Amino acid sequence: MTLTRRALGVVALTIGVLVSTADAHASTVAKAKPRKFTLSSPAFRNGGTIPDGFTCAGPGASPPLRWKHLPKRTKDLALTVEDTDAPGRTFVHWAAWGIDPGAGSLPEETIPATVHQGSTTTGQTKYFGPCPPPGSEAHHYIFTLYALSKRVSLPDGASITELRAAISSTTLRTAKLVGRFGR
């Protein structure tokens, strides 16, 4: 009988330790932060120099972009590219929306037919590669990807101001990539 009570005591103690360990693990998992929504390019690193091929020093193709860890309720993506060092005001190089969140990337110089593009500062409705004034120091080009809870309903050619107004209440998170270019 003593042996049976000891065996039951050991079993009860073991179960208690296992339950305690499981509770601690569940608590750790519940407290884990969501992964950070990120934007990157295989063409240049964050803070690095944008290669000539994606600027006015080359063909001016739109660079390949990749994103990871979208917020769960993401239904649409919007993208802006701006030069914050332009003389006088921020220069808009690209505004796009209707980007498929599930695609995970935009290939170089390939814009899916479902993507809408807004007006740049030059009035074009396509990517306009970095092109700071000759002799100026490198400018910073900020690529901002917006994860949106609803689809954007704007016509092609909309201004960046119209885009910002349309996404202001539906932006879940943003991810940024900064490239530099000077000539």
Image (cartoon, rainbow, N blue to C red):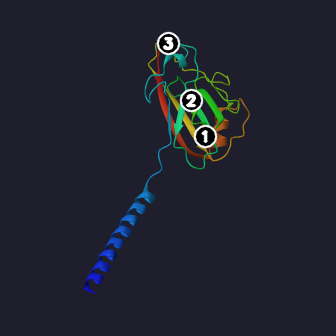
* Res. 70 mark: none
Q: Position of residue 179 (x, y in %)?
A: 47, 26
> Looking at the image, which residue sits at the far left?
2
Q: Relative to 2, is 16 on the left or the right?
A: right
- Name the secondary structure under disc 2: strand
Marks 1 and 2 sit apart, C-alpha to C-alpha, by: 21 Å
Task: Find residue 122 and report its horizontal and vertical position in percent.
Answer: 64, 21
Q: Earlier along the polypeptide chain: callout 1 or callout 2?
A: 2
Of mark 1 and mark 3, the one earlier in the sequence is 1
Q: Amino acid at mark 3?
A: Pro
Q: Nearer the viewer, residue 94 or 160?
A: 94
**Is 47 placed above or below 150 here?**
above
- Residue 153: x %, y % from top left: 72, 40
Residue at numbered disc 3: 134
Left or right, residue 10 beside residue 135: left
* Residue position for label 1: 102
Residue at x-position 29% and y-position 83%: 5
